[in-house]
């Protein structure tokens, strides 16, 4: 039976936005030796398996704020000890309406890379330290590309050593990190690359 047009349609109910946070942890005392940690998601994960991301996840009821969420998730995924790093602050939350989620990037720093290791091999396949400058780094023009999905542009892409292909939301955050440090973003004219099937699920 079709709806009676004289009866107002019920209001659309929006899905509540889930709060999440990711940790951008930079280690190093000079820009030329600075690096940040990334993780390759487990290949059997239901959401984005095999993709590279920053440590992080959804807020738990016991978390005090977004910083607390980012540090807790980093501890659960990489073994990071909060006392080993200095939290520099949190950025403005980034809405992701297509996932009913809002993500807050949190920036932390340590003079040297803290001892990190995969805590749950089902959730995290491996950890990768990505240099910020120099050959093989995020700012290496030879490793900067523009990602495409079925010919449609999806933003910056970093083809890091060790088959660490970073694209999507994480790559966009990393590009903003480069800009914030006074480094060049991925050029609009950088070579285009189609995201391979194993990195797009």
Image: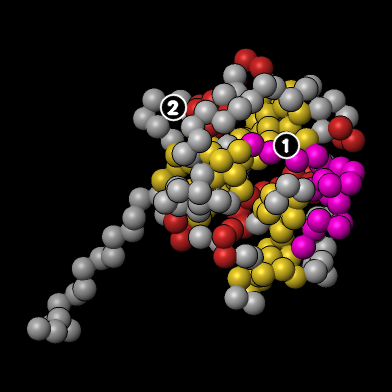
Q: Where does residue 120 sit, x and y in percent of width and height?
A: 49, 32
Residue 138 within the segment the image draws in magenta: yes
Residue that appears at 48% across and 39% down: 123
The relative height of residue 48 versus residue 155 in the rendered view (above or below) is above
Q: Secondary structure at mark 1?
A: strand
Which picture quadrant has residue 92?
Answer: top right
Q: Where does residue 42 sit, x and y in percent of width and height?
A: 51, 44
Residue 175: mark in rendering: none
Which residue does the numbered mark 2 point to in the structure image? 63
Q: Residues within 10 Å of mark 2 (few under 14, many from 20)?
A: some
Q: Where does residue 62 sit, x and y in percent of width and height?
A: 39, 25
Q: Which residues are magenta?
A: 127-145
Residue that appears at 75% across and 50% down: 160
* Front label number (1 vs 2): 1
Which residue does the numbered mark 1 point to in the structure image? 129
In the rendered image, the residue lying farthest to the top is: 83
Between 7 and 135, the residue placed more toward the observer is: 135
Mark closer to the chain start, 1 or 2: 2
């Amino acid at each position: 039976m079709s709806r009676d047009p004289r009866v107002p349609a019920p209001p659309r109910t929006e899905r509540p936005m889930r709060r999440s946070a990711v940790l951008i942890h930079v280690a190093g005392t000079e820009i030329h030796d600075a690096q940040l940690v990334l993780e390759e998601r487990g290949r059997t994960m239901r959401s984005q398996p095999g993709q590279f991301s920053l440590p992080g996840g959804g807020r738990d009821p016991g978390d005090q704020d977004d910083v607390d969420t980012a540090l807790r998730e980093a501890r659960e995924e990489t073994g990071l000890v909060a006392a080993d790093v200095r939290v520099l602050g949190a950025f403005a939350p980034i809405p992701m309406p297509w996932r009913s989620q809002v993500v807050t990037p949190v920036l932390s720093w340590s003079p040297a890379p803290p001892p990190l290791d995969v805590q749950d091999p089902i959730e995290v396949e491996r950890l990768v330290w990505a240099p910020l400058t120099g050959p093989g780094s995020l700012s290496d023009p030879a490793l900067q590309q523009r990602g495409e999905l079925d010919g449609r542009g999806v933003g910056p892409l970093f083809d890091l050593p060790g088959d660490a292909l970073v694209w999507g939301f994480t790559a966009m955050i990393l590009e903003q990190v480069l800009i914030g440090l006074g480094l060049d973003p991925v050029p609009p004219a950088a070579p285009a690359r189609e995201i391979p099937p194993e990195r797009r699920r």
